[in-house]
Image (cartoon, grey):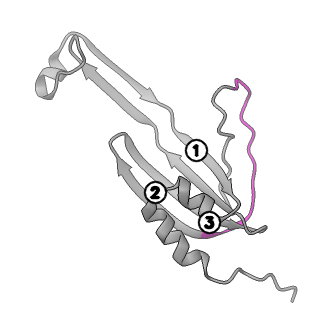
Amino acid sequence: MLPAVPPCSRSSNRTPTFRRCEGVLLADWNRSTATGTEHYRVYRTRTGKLAVHVSRPKGFVHTAGKDGQLTGWRKHFATDQQWGETPAAAILEVYDTFEDLRAEVPAELAALVEVNATEPEVEDLDI
């Protein structure tokens, strides 16, 4: 089952609603970037669509100096420091076909999903 995630609309001031759906996990992939880490999970839904859940953890920003370019020990002893945090984010996107998914996710993840997406779907048996 997919984890419950809030909707990805940032412009709304509403309280997020949580939704749940079912799927088969095809790939669980992580990568690090200059801004932090990203955790991707790709599921095949009951209707055959591909759902991609991307989560990014809370980030921390710290700059110092008049132009924000101080580094090393000078950064920590500067009198003009700025710092802050970016919120954690979780996004759920659903694609109708594998070709749609391939155009939107990193190539390495698409290759991993392609291998597993060819496996037969799970058949529910009423035994």
Residue 16 is a magenta residue = yes
Structural distance between the alpha carbons of marks 1 and 2? 17 Å
Location of the N terminus by quadrant is bottom right
Q: Can you say whether 68 is above or below 89 in the image?
A: above
Residue type beneath disc 1 = Ala
Q: Please report the residue visible at 73 percent of the width from the left and 44 percent of the height from the top.
A: 18
Say whether disc 3 or disc 2 marks the residue closer to the N-terminus: 3
Q: Please report the residue visible at 47 percent of the width from the left and 63 percent of the height from the top.
A: 109
Determine which residue is flagged by label 2.
106
Q: Can you say whether 49 is above or below 64 in the image?
A: below
Q: Please report the residue visible at 78 percent of the width from the left and 67 percent of the height from the top.
A: 47
Circle on res. 82: none
User: Which element is circle 1 on?
Assistant: strand
User: Which element is circle 3 on?
Assistant: helix
Q: Can you say whether 56 is above or below 96 in the image?
A: above
Residue 65 located left or right of residue 36: left
Residue type beneath disc 2 = Pro
- Foreground of the two, 108 or 37: 108
User: Which element is circle 2 on?
Assistant: loop
Provide the residue span drawn in magenta.
Answer: 12-25
Count of labels in the image: 3
Residue type beneath disc 3 = Phe
Determine which residue is flagged by label 1.
90
* Residue 45 in the image, given as x and y percentages of width and height: 72, 66
Structural distance between the alpha carbons of marks 1 and 3? 21 Å
Determine which residue is flagged by label 3.
98
Structural distance between the alpha carbons of marks 3 and 2? 13 Å
Q: Please identify, in this view, whether the residue under mark 1 or under mark 3 is nearer the observer.
A: 3
